[in-house]
Image (cartoon, rainbow, N blue to C red):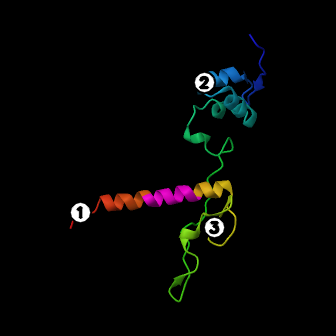
Amino acid sequence: MINRKHYEMDDGTTMTVDEVMAATGLSRQGAGRRLKLSRNKDWVCLPMGHPDLIGGPSGREDIQRDWDEEVKVYGGIAMNPPALDGTVKGDKSFDRYGNPLSYSERTALAKHKQKHRDEWIASINNKEDV
């Protein structure tokens, strides 16, 4: 058997990539990445797709940004409509003010738009035929 690197966990035990692969169902690269990211054995051994994996071992929250901020209207023309959030120019995305969006901001915007789209579809499906 091949000698694998042993990673010391915060509870004093050691784990190898093979043990993490068996516990989580991850590939060798994924298991190695988890061991490099954290020494918390509970987090490292979470199965693939577990909600606690979002944001990494630190548990970073999603970016909280007010995507529903008030739209300014001048002379009947919307000056900063929400439709301009996520505008793509070349290979970059921008918010309605022309500021570039980071990957996490683009992801948060996509989730926000999907949530509102789902609510809109549900409201249409719940209306009675007139």
Residue 61 percent coordinates (x, y)? 63, 51
Residue 119 percent coordinates (x, y)? 41, 59
Residue 61 shown left or right of residue 13 in the figure: left
Amino acid at pointer 1: Glu
Amino acid at pointer 2: Ala
Name the outermost residue toward the top.
Answer: 1
Q: Nearer the viewer, mark 2 or mark 3?
A: 3
Name the outermost residue toward the front.
Answer: 90
Q: Which residue is mark 2?
A: 23
Q: CA distance from mark 2 to mark 3?
A: 41 Å
Q: Which mark is residue 33?
A: none
The vertical placement of 114 against 58, above or below, is below
Whether residue 82 appears in magenta in the rendering, the answer is no
Q: Which mark is residue 95?
A: 3
Residue numbers of the magenta segment? 109-117
Q: Please rate how many residues cluster around mark 3, counting C-alpha atoms within 10 Å: few if below 14, some from 14 to 19, many from 20.
A: many
Say whether marks 2 and 1 touch (CB < 8 Å): no
Q: CA distance from mark 2 to mark 1?
A: 50 Å
**Which structural element holds mark 3?**
loop
* Sequence order check, earlier mark of 2 and 3: 2
Name the residue nearer the viewer: 22 or 79.
79
Q: Which residue is mark 1?
A: 128
Looking at the magenta stretch, what is its main secondary structure?
Answer: helix
Number of disc labels? 3
Amino acid at pointer 3: Asp
* Sequence order check, earlier mark of 2 and 1: 2
**Which structural element holds mark 2?**
helix
Which residue is depicted at the point 61% across and 21% down? 22
